[in-house]
Structure formats: C-alpha cells, structure tokens
Image (cartoon, helix red, strand yellow):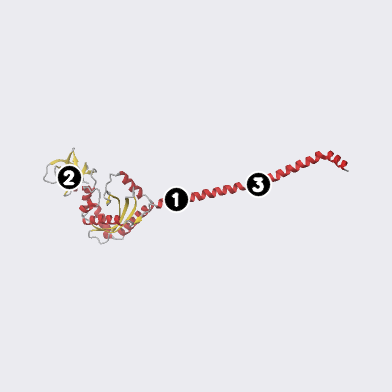
Amino acid sequence: MLDDFREWLSDNLRYILLGLAILAVLLILFFGGRALIGVLRSEPAQEEQQTEQERNSSEDTGSEEVEETDTNALEENAYPEVNILIESFYDAWGQKNVDAMRELTDNFSSTDEAKVVNATYIESYDNIQVYTKKGLDDNSYVVFAAYDLKFQGIDTPAPGLSELYVMKDESNNWLIHNDESDQEVQECIEKTRQEDDVQELISQVEENYNQTVESNEELKSYLEQLGEETNTALMADDGDMLTAAEDCNVRADANTSSQILGRLQAGDQVKKLENAGDSWIKVEYNGQEAYIHSDLLQ
C-alpha cells in the first residue's frame, strides 16, 4: 500500500507542484489586489485631507489678513487729548485767534494767518467729531475732523470735513503738524484717505453737505456768491505763481504812495513770496522783492 502511494506520488508530483504554484500565484494576486485597492482608496482620502488642510490654512490666513486690516480701523472720538487739540484749533479759527492757532501747530506761516484773518465769512465750527487712524508711528495720528461750518448771517450750517496730522513734540505735547513740504506725512495722509472706512466717511459728509445745500436756498446762494468773492491770491501758498487779473502797478513797498517799479499786463504772472499785510502781497519781480495789492492778483 505504501509502495503504491509512493509510486503514485512519484508519477503525479509534477502536477501537484504545478497546482501548488498556481494556488500560490492566485493567493499573491488576491492579497496583492486587495492591498492595491487599499492604497488607491487611501490616496483620495489623503488628497481630500490635504485639500481640507489647505482650505483651513487659507481661511486662517484670510482671518489674519482681516485682523491686520482692522488693527488700524477708523476710530471716533477715541483720544481725549487729540479731541481737545482739534476742538481748540477750530475754536481759535472761528475767533480768528491766530496766536492760539500758532501755539497749537508746529508751523504757522503768514499765508496760514492770512487765510484765517481774511475768512471773515466764517463764524464758527460747531459739533466737531474727531476721527483718527494711526500715523507713521505710535505718537501720531491722521485726523479727519467733521463739523458744522457756520457762516456769518446764515442760520443753517454746512457740513464739512478736514484732514490733519497730529503728533507729539519733544515735550510730549500734541500738536498739529502743519507742513505740506513733509512728503512722508503727505503720502501717509493720502494713503489713509484711500482706505475704505475713510472713503465711507468722506462720502457720508459729502452726501450730507449736498442735501443741506440743495434743501436751503439761502445757504446755496450764499456759497455761490462766496466762491466768486473769495480772494484766492491771499490764500495761495508762498511760492505759488499768481496771475494779474488786470493791468496793475508793481510797487517798492506795501502802500499806494510807494515807488512804482513797473507794471504787469493782465495775464502776466509773478511768484508769490508771502502775504505782506493790509491785503498786499510780496512778490518776486525782475529779481527783486516788490508788492502788489491782492485784489489785482488771482
């Protein structure tokens, strides 16, 4: 019996080995296929997980950007010392107190003084609201002052908005930085003006102004007449070119009795040096200082 089994095994061994090999291959293919399917299934999950992580990272970055923008949001009446400075400045303007205005600024030229003194049509600045944004450093702010501008003899005030730059001086006092030649500050003001919340404020004040003027005929007529009568020459900055509105004398001193140095024809231009008082303007004429009455220039 045993000899018969050995003989049978010997005769069929190659078939048995072939069957085992085929079975082994099938097992490899089966388990390998399952492993491959597992890998293929895991890859989309990994990609989805990676996409989700990237989305969350993007959302976090967006939140950080919003927070960064909000760190310099427009604030209303947030700093009492700045409020006092701005209110004092406009109170002094309404009273034509140029000495007080000079103390509240770091630079107050003769042109600035002339603008205030000659603005006799301004009675007062009322209901002042102070809006601030951070300036170039922690000791400075860009200020937007909203107010009701009261004109002499007109009951209804006109809404207005002005921009200023305030900073601390060496004594740690707040002052208005009044220097248009400071390019860095001017660029800071311009950049701040373009920000969304400031543009919204500007649009709001403009809308209030237009509605107020259109709804009040007395105020509207007054403003139209004021625009025609305002002396632009006195309000021009030192260094500006002024144009002769008509033929006029150029004098050696600021009075009608002084020597006549020459004449300008209507349309001729001269460089303004400064306001000379009593509505006269010092100009540069043929390389020397001379004087022309402001009513003859524009």
Q: Is residue 198 left or right of residue 225?
A: right
Q: Give the image location of residue 153, x and y in percent.
A: 22, 60
Q: Measure the C-alpha gap from mark 1 to mark 2.
A: 60 Å
**N-terminal label among 1 and 2:** 1
Residue 230 in view here: no
Residue 20 in view here: yes
Q: Measure the C-alpha gap from mark 3 to mark 1.
A: 41 Å
Q: Residues within 10 Å of mark 2 (few under 14, many from 20)?
A: many
Amino acid carrying mark 3 in the image: Ile
Report helix, strand or loop for mark 2: strand
Q: Which mark is residue 292?
A: 2
Q: Which residue is mark 1?
A: 64
Q: Give the quarter of the image for residue 125.
A: bottom left
Q: Residues within 10 Å of mark 1 (few under 14, many from 20)?
A: few
Q: Which mark is residue 37?
A: 3
**N-terminal label among 3 and 1:** 3
Q: What is the residue that sits farthest to the left in this orientation?
A: 257
Question: Do the CB atoms of the residues marked 1 and 2 lie less than 8 Å apart?
Answer: no
**N-terminal label among 3 and 2:** 3
Amino acid carrying mark 1 in the image: Glu
Name the one closer to the observer, 284 or 22: 22
Tell us which disc is closer to us: 1 or 2. Answer: 1
Amino acid carrying mark 2 in the image: Ile
Question: Do the CB atoms of the residues marked 3 and 1 lie less than 8 Å apart?
Answer: no
Q: Give the image location of residue 178, x and y in percent.
A: 26, 48
